[in-house]
Amino acid sequence: MTECPILTRKMLPKPVDLTIEDPALDFPRAKHAADRRARELCAEPLLLAWFDRAAGRHSPNIVCCREDRPTWLVYALSRGGDLVIDINREAFVFVYLRG
């Protein structure tokens, strides 16, 4: 099995950046902000995948890895994910399918 690559900005196709200056920013708050921004950009966004760098978590929690991108990101993009919300320089990333 290949070691999973560390997420970098160049892996994200056309990310929409959000900067949230909140020392208490956690996953629920980040997800709420990403959902709100996604709804501003499209009618019915469907969340396909997410990443939380500090917690070292992502969904879907796929165990196999590729050399070029983390598999949770490959999963979302291969299913049509076309809206990427990047919060605080990849601290949190949410990938949606535009509805």
Image (cartoon, rainbow, N blue to C red):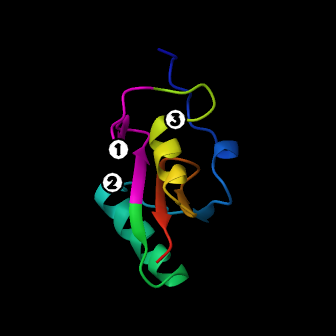
Q: For label 1, count other residues whose C-alpha is less than 10 Å away and answer few (under 14), some (14-19) or many (20+).
A: some
Image-quadrant location for residue 9: top right
| Dot 3: element | loop
Horizontally, residue 22 falls left or right of residue 42, namely left
Q: Which residue is mark 2?
A: 27
Which mark is first along the chain, 3 or 2?
2
Above or below for 71 versus 25: above
Sequence-first tag of 1 and 3: 1
Q: Amino acid at mark 3?
A: Pro
Residue behind mark 1: 60
Q: Which residues are magenta?
A: 48-64
Q: Residue at x 46, y 85 (%)?
A: 43
How far apart are labels 2 and 3 at the CA level?
19 Å
Whether pointer 2 and pointer 1 mark residues with C-beta atoms closer than 8 Å, the reply is: no
Q: Amino acid at mark 2?
A: Phe
Figure quadrant of residue 13:
bottom right
Label 1, secondary structure: give it. loop
Residue 19 location in percent, x, y? 55, 62
**Image height check: is 50 above or below 66?**
below
Whether residue 89 is in magenta: the answer is no
Q: Which residue is mark 3?
A: 70
> Which residue lies most toward the top here?
1
Above or below: residue 66 compared with residue 77: above
Q: Nearer the viewer, mark 2 or mark 1?
A: 1
Amino acid type for the residue under numbered disc 1: Pro
Report how far apart the C-alphas of labels 1 and 3 lie in the structure.
Answer: 11 Å
- Residue at 68%, 60% (x, y): give it: 14
Q: Residue at x 48, y 36 (%)?
A: 71
Q: Position of residue 95 (x, y in %)?
A: 48, 58
Where is residue 10? Give x, y as percent. 70, 44
